[in-house]
Amino acid sequence: MALITANWNPLGEAFYRKTELYEMSWNLRDGLKDCLVAAAPYGGPIALLREPLRRSPSCRPQLEIYSASGLVIASFPWKSGPLIQLGWTVCDELLCVQEDGSVLIYDLFGSFKRHFSMGQEVVQSQALEAKVFHSPYGTGVAIVTGSFRFTLVTNINDLKLRRLPTVPGLQVAPSCWTVLTQDRQTKVLLATGAELYILDNTSCTAVCPPGLSPQSGNVVNMAVSFSYKYLALFTDGGHLWTGYSSLQDNLSEADTKVRTPPKQMVWCRRSKSQQPSVVMVWDRLLLVVGLCNDIIQFPLESPCVCVGELDGVRIISGANQELLQEVPLVCQDIFKIASMAPGALLLEAHREYEKSSQKADEYLREVKEQSMLGEAVRQCVEAAGHEYDPSTQKSLLRAASFGKCFLPDFSPEHFVSTCRELRVLNAVRERSVGLPLTHTQFKQITLQVLIDRLVYRQMYPLAIEICRYLKIPDYQGVSRVLKHWAACKVQQKDLSDEAIARAVCVKVGDSPGVSYSHIASKAYECGRTELTIKLLDSEARSGEQVPLLLKMKRSQLALSKAVESGDTDLVYTVVTYLKNEMNRGDFFMTLRNQPVALSLYRQFCKVQEQETLRDLYNQDDDHQELANYYVSASYREKRLDSRLSLLQSAVDEFNKAKNDFAAKATEDDIRLLRFQKKLDDEKGAGLLGLSLQVTMETLLVLGLYKQTDQLYRDFKVPDKRYWWLKVKSLAEKEEWEELEKFSKSKKSPIGYLAFVEACMKRNNKHEARKYLSRVAPEQKVKAHLAVGDLEGAADAAIERRNESEMASVAARCSPSDRLLAERLHRAKMSAGKK
């Protein structure tokens, strides 16, 4: 315990400690002197530009990117304009702000991604100073120009430049300034002499911090906390004022006894802090000033850079990197001298237990008598999360494990999750990885973001092991990592297409959530067309293959894949794309090689593009379908001459197709149309477009019997059809004489029952009886029944000796027809005996 508390420094009621994170692996001859340095929070990377003011074309400054442990990630000469600021986005992308207001964005490996400008005014007057900040909207950049105007953008991914109002009477550059985020609005706080101003979108407001005495001097440095909640102001009189960033209330004012402005001021604060503090850095001195006006002094051997974190401050020097933070309360309770906290007693009990000492029982009994054993276990587990040293973590967790054995209803979830999380944190804290996250930071950024950061650094094996160890679902874990790995793999120029495709297929396999089309698209972006096709062959979903193949101009292959999928919508999509991209001849030739696609396109054309359909048939010399097209088209024409022309074209095509029947039928249609046109002109009959049968029916209704006979002869209408039509028409018109005359013209091919039934439909028994004698014997019973002649029907049935007919007639007999029924019965019995 004494070793653990040896580096604790009291500050008011709290303690502060410095924990060494790494001995830096870089080799900086002069340390961080004359370097422009930017380190990302949450244990992020470090960017370093040596001698940024050197502008000799023959000797350009070197921009280097390191991990937090000092391992070089990328290094390249800076060939662009003079830099005034470096910064990191929340996605670990490096922002390089130049004097002319241009902001260049590089990835973690030094590859240029894009750039943007902060506006023409910055280009003209140049930028004096810039700051990279983080807000709820994303990563932002703020610049003060040579004309002392402020320009900022709150989100570099949604570029909306804001030019803030001028400060009245401002003739010199602000002595210091910072960016504040309040109420979802980004503002600038600046100091000029003893006066403070807040600039927002529309106004410039003078402010006076409460509690800051006029004798304190001019404000020469300021710092805002990690959460933008607190503000610190340092004056040239050596006074440090701390308060809320809203400037509505103050926390303290301390005299540091140092009048030289610090190089850096950073808040050091954790959640539920007992004693938040401000860290100030000079060339050889680091002060930690608390709200209680107590001060901790740390001498510095070389220049350093401080990085504000969620729960402390990272101090980076040329030799090492340390974490300065307030000792968490639970750690104070356990490790401070003579502590009687439950966690401290449990830890001591476990130490005595390992020595096989009976004192272990005494300590444990003391905790149990206070009913604090559960609290003791909780304290040990929580304290283990806050410790950086693995041996201390193990000691605390073993004590917690020892204590929970005496708790029958203890829930192990928190203990198990902490053990797992610490194992992950210890792995990423390794020098080779260089992510010195605390447990508090880890819980803030979440496991998913940690995996993303490992993937972004191309540490795929470690990311996969963590996913498997923590049993993250594949689609969120291993599969997602493999997708990024594969996208990176296809960019390796030193490997052949075959080797990369084989490696990707072996590694990825059929992992759920991994799309080969996504990997293939990355390969295509790198210009590796053959590799793209090889990868697409492994994609099981045709709907994912086809769009990329079309983008690659591999239309034939895209069409083949679409047809193989059996998805008609996908085929239509490809066909539509090809139609728009290819000339007409090549398009038709492409479809000819894919019968399924051609058939589907024809179906589409039948509904949407009739003219294209004709061209398709012409292209294929398909005379039969072309003739059918002309016939269909003729029915859409209103003018007779156009319709006849199309029908004549259809006749020609039917003849070429050697379809004599269809050709003859079409010729008949032409003759019928001409006949109808002639009658329309002569009689006004309105026959044009009617079928042959309807035409004949209409003529009969109009009494044009000669013209009907002409159609009958010319078109060789079957006798039965013609007689049925005429009998029906004459009966409906009640032209009984004409009907009788027609019946005697020649022997009826449809018999004479039709005459009887036609007359009875008009309720004319008199006329119907005229034809009874001419009805065929087998139809006489039906004919007599049709006219209501039961005796005649009975006579006919008895004469034919047909039992079923006799039964049918008998069924219709009423009680008054008793004699007739008996007669039928006797005849039926007689016929049955014979």
Image (cartoon, grey):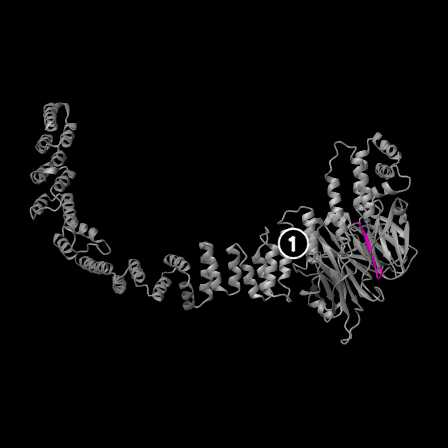
Q: Nearer the viewer, residue 344 or 533?
A: 533
The residue positioned 76% from the left and 72% from the top of the image is 60
Q: Nearer the viewer, residue 369 or 177?
A: 369
Task: Pinpoint residue 85: horizontal percent, then vertical percent.
Answer: 76, 64
User: Which quarter of the rendering shows the C terminus?
Assistant: top left
Which residue extends farthest bottom? 58
Q: Is residue 396 left or right of residue 809?
A: right
Segment tinted magenta in the rendering: 311-319
The residue positioned 73% from the left and 71% from the top of the image is 79
Residue 435: quarter of image: bottom right
Task: Pinpoint residue 369: horizontal percent, then vertical percent.
Answer: 84, 29
Residue 275 seen in the current view:
yes
Disc 1 marks a residue whose amino acid type is: Val
Q: Nearer the viewer, residue 383 or 126?
A: 383
Residue at the disc numbered 1: 481
Residue 137 seen in the current view:
no
User: Which quarter of the rendering shows the N terminus?
Assistant: top right
Which residue extends farthest front? 356
Residue 317 highlighted magenta (yes or no): yes
Q: Main secondary structure of the magenta part?
A: strand
Residue 830: quarter of image: top left
